[in-house]
């Protein structure tokens, strides 16, 4: 692996800026906005709710009509494959004076929504869901009151849904998380003009009886969760030197760099700066011998989206990779534990699948061979196995490979560009 790559704008941050820009007064200009299909689902929803949206490649211009400026959508909103869209937007929709129906694709409509219904209902929201847990959701907006919510699981989406509903609630809203999760919502709220208080693992907002959010210019850092596929690929091959440019390095996202470094990866951070409270910089990655190891406990929520790549590196490591306490992986875009175990085995890996994780044997269990991969429509499974395929013997075919576009439409082009062939 050689040369440079700039992964697309961060998906999590793009969703949040798009939602807050739609609730702001005046124009916003969002540079390096994620080209991800997921974030375009959010843009389409905000447009249907009355925001002006113009997209010029990765520059998004939006004009909102202020915090009370959303309008009823005539059609049901389509969140596509995006859990962040439906869960965060539900918080906003709960506080509107109109009713909204929102649903997604077949995968999203099978993901649990009870986790947001419970706190939003405590705030006074009226939401109906299929089997009281799944989209389509019908959200009858109305008056909300602030609550303190102790989250039963470490989920940034749940935390964010409650905080965003708190924008429309009477009184203060606070959320405590059992373990630290990404804090992009907190940082974005502050940037758009809403003060946020943080005490340990509790976040609180007091929307002050309707102070306005203000449109702004913002630059979205590159997505570290997308960069991880390149970090992994460069680590796998001895002579690699890869430069990854303009990546988000928010400390609630960089645990994966600690995990990989602990396993022996060579990753250097360069040119650090901040944009809207988000740390960003470049990464220089060299090929290395990976030892492998264990990921568990409080580290898990901080690396949740990177676990597919980490597991797929397992067979190339000295000791293998073991993941525990990650039952949440079963309710992502696919059942990622099952998808990883199945596809790793197709390539000849030795895998023990467990309810909350998996153990992937290392190099001693034998070399991987190319295989036909079934990513189950899950972008991160497709990309993780594209990387594993580079280091396997023989060709690999990834079915439905374009599902990578959910977060990274140019992934295979970028990978092909930095992968040098030695015959
Ligand atoms: C996200 C939070 C995580 C993550 C998802 C994006 C976010 O989900 O897996 O890809 O943008 O807040 P959970 O909050 O369900 O853990």
Image (cartoon, grey):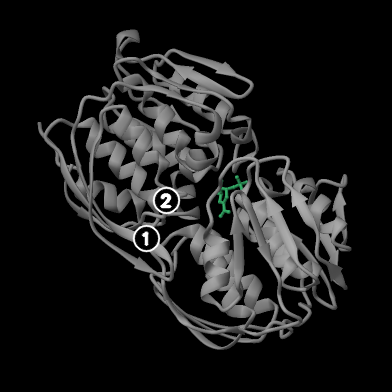
Ligand 1 under 8 Å from disc 2 Cβ? no
Marks 1 and 2 in Cβ contact (< 8 Å): yes
Q: Residues within 10 Å of mark 2 (few under 14, many from 20)?
A: few
Task: Determine the residue positioned at 40% across, 14% down.
Answer: 361
- Residue 270 relative to residue 377: left or right: left
Is 146 drawn above or below residue 410 in the view shown? below
Sequence order check: which comes first, mark 1 or mark 2? Answer: 2
Q: Position of residue 47 (x, y in %)?
A: 63, 78
Q: Which residue is mark 2?
A: 251
Ligand 1 under 8 Å from disc 1 Cβ? no
Q: Which residue is mark 1?
A: 279
Looking at the figure, which quarter contains the C terminus?
Answer: top left
Is 352 drawn above or below residue 260 in the view shown? above
Task: Determine the residue positioned at 44% across, 48% down.
Answer: 253
Residue sitting nearer the eye, 12 or 331? 12
Residue 78 visible to an observer of this rendering: no
**Residue 112, picture quadrant:** top right
Q: How many marks do you count on the picture? A: 2
Is 228 drawn above or below residue 327 in the view shown? below
Q: Position of residue 275 (x, y in %)?
A: 38, 69
**Residue 52, picture quadrant:** bottom right
What kind of element bears circle 2?
loop
Task: Determine the residue positioned at 70% across, 59% down.
Answer: 161
Looking at the figure, which quarter contains the N terminus?
Answer: top left
Is 277 drawn above or below residue 238 in the view shown? below
């Amino acid at each position: 692996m050689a040369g440079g790559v700039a992964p697309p704008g961060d998906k999590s941050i793009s969703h949040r800026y798009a939602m807050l820009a739609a609730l702001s007064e005046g124009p916003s200009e969002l540079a390096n906005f994620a080209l991800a299909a997921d974030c375009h689902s959010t843009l389409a929803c905000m447009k249907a709710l009355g925001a002006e949206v113009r997209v010029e490649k990765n520059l998004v211009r939006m004009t909102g009509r202020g915090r009370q400026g959303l309008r009823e959508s005539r059609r049901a909103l389509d969140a596509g494959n995006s859990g962040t869209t439906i869960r965060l937007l539900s918080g906003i929709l709960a506080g509107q004076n109109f009713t909204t129906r929102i649903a997604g694709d077949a995968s999203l409509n099978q993901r649990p929504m009870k986790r947001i219904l419970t706190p939003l209902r405590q705030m006074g929201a009226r939401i109906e869901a299929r089997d009281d847990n799944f989209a389509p959701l019908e959200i009858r907006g109305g008056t909300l009151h602030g609550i303190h919510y102790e989250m039963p699981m470490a989920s940034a989406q749940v935390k964010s849904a409650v905080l965003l509903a708190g924008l429309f609630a009477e009184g203060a809203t606070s959320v405590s998380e059992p373990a630290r999760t990404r804090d992009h919502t907190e940082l974005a709220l502050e940037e758009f003009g809403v003060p946020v208080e943080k005490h340990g693992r509790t976040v609180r907002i007091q929307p002050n009886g309707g102070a306005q959010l203000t449109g702004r210019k913002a630059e979205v850092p590159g997505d570290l969760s997308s960069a991880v596929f390149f970090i992994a690929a460069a680590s796998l091959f001895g002579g690699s030197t890869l430069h990854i440019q303009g990546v988000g390095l928010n400390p609630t996202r960089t645990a994966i760099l600690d995990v990989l470094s602990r396993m022996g990866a060579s990753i250097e951070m360069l040119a650090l700066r901040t944009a809207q409270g988000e740390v960003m910089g470049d990464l220089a990655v060299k090929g290395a011998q990976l030892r492998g190891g264990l990921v568990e406990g409080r580290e898990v929520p901080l690396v949740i989206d990177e676990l597919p790549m980490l597991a797929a590196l397992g067979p190339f490591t000295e000791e293998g990779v073991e993941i525990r306490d990650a039952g949440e992986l079963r309710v992502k875009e696919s059942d990622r534990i099952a998808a990883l175990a199945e596809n790793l085995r197709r390539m000849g890996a030795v895998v023990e699948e467990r309810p909350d994780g998996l153990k992937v044997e290392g190099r001693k269990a034998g070399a991987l061979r190319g295989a036909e991969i079934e990513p189950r429509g899950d972008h991160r499974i497709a990309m993780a196995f594209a990387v594993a395929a580079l280091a396997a013997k023989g060709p690999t075919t990834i079915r439905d490979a374009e599902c990578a576009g959910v977060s990274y439409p140019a992934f295979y082009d970028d990978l092909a560009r930095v992968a040098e062939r030695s015959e």
